[in-house]
Image (cartoon, helix red, strand yellow):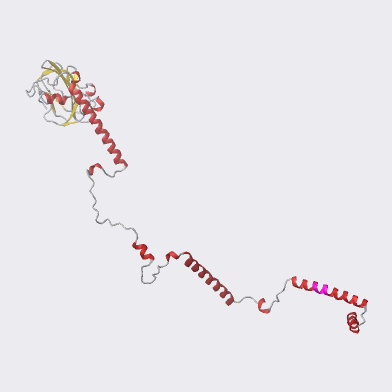
Amino acid sequence: MTDSFETRRDASDGTPNAPATRRARREMESRRIKDRGTAHSASTAPRKTPTTASQKQPRSGKSIARSWASTAIVGLVVPGLFATMALPSYATPEVAGDGPSSYDIATASAQTLDASGVAVEPALNLVRDSYGATTTEELEAAREAAAAEAAAKRAAEQAKKSSSSNAGGGNVYSAIAGDGTVRWPLPSRGTIGDGFMSRGGSHEGVDILIAGGTPIGAVADGVVVTSQESYGGYGVAVVVEHQINGQTVTSTYGHMTYGSRQVSVGQHVSAGQVLGLVGSTGRSTANHLHLEIRINGGLVNPLSWLSANGAY
């Protein structure tokens, strides 16, 4: 400080002291550099905020409640703003002035269909029995019934063909129709069971269902050629041979009741004479008469032959 003061004094006197002046300048320059370094360090150093007594104290319950209330308000306001901006289509359409709104125009222009005046034509050719809602079991039963009906139809057609061709037996009109030469073998018609050539063509006669013990008569005059208690699948059976208009006709009566036979081999019988009683012997499951008719050794339909000769 003295050198600096002396330098200024010398300068004011007009007699500058060169060495003192240079020294003073160097010292001033050194101080300026030092002052700049100190100022730079002070500016870059982190500031420490003085801690007051109020800051060191714990937060009160009212302060915490105010903080939670502020958070809740923000949580309610933000979704409301989002709903207002993101879902404008749910807003109630506003009416501008006295004219219709865009909502009214869109509603009025929507396409509609009024079918109240349209007449419905009823379905044609609709038969109630031709359709129905059925279970699996009912469908299976229907299929089985249809198959059985088809099989019966085929058997009837086959029997018709066999009857028309007489299976090699000759003309079924072997007697004068209705003259009494051929008669029905039972006192009543009974019920027809398995028909001629049914069971796939293996049934060679016709089954007439009737009560057990019903008398069985010969279909025409003839001679007994078979009378047995066990005649194979026929069970108790009788076979009679007839000579009608030059043709040999053989009639067989099967499944009679045991011990009911009234005739023996070689015996001559007349039309309608009792041969035995209806039963269920041999290959049989119910009381019935199994009747077979052969003409010259060939099978014919018994019902067709009886009908052709006026007995049925």
- The one nearer the camera, 64 or 37, is 37
- The one nearer the camera, 42 or 64, is 42
* Place of residue 84 in the rendered image (x, y in percent of width and height, measured from the top left): 47, 67
In this rendering, the answer to whether 12 lies above or below 238 is below
- The one nearer the camera, 127 or 146, is 127
* Place of residue 88 in the rendered image (x, y in percent of width and height, measured from the top left): 45, 65
In this rendering, the answer to whether 3 lies above or below 266 is below
- The one nearer the camera, 88 or 246, is 88
Q: Which residues lie in the magenta part?
A: 32-36
* Place of residue 48 in the rendered image (x, y in percent of width and height, measured from the top left): 72, 74
Q: In which quarter of the image is residue 216?
A: top left
Q: In which quarter of the image is residue 172?
A: top left
* Place of residue 266 in the rendered image (x, y in percent of width and height, measured from the top left): 14, 15
Residue 33 is covered by the magenta coloring? yes
- Pick the quarter of the image with the N terminus: bottom right
Residue at (29, 37) in percent of width and height:
143
State left or right for residue 53 relative to residue 151.
right
> Hey, which residue is sitting farthest left in the picture?
179
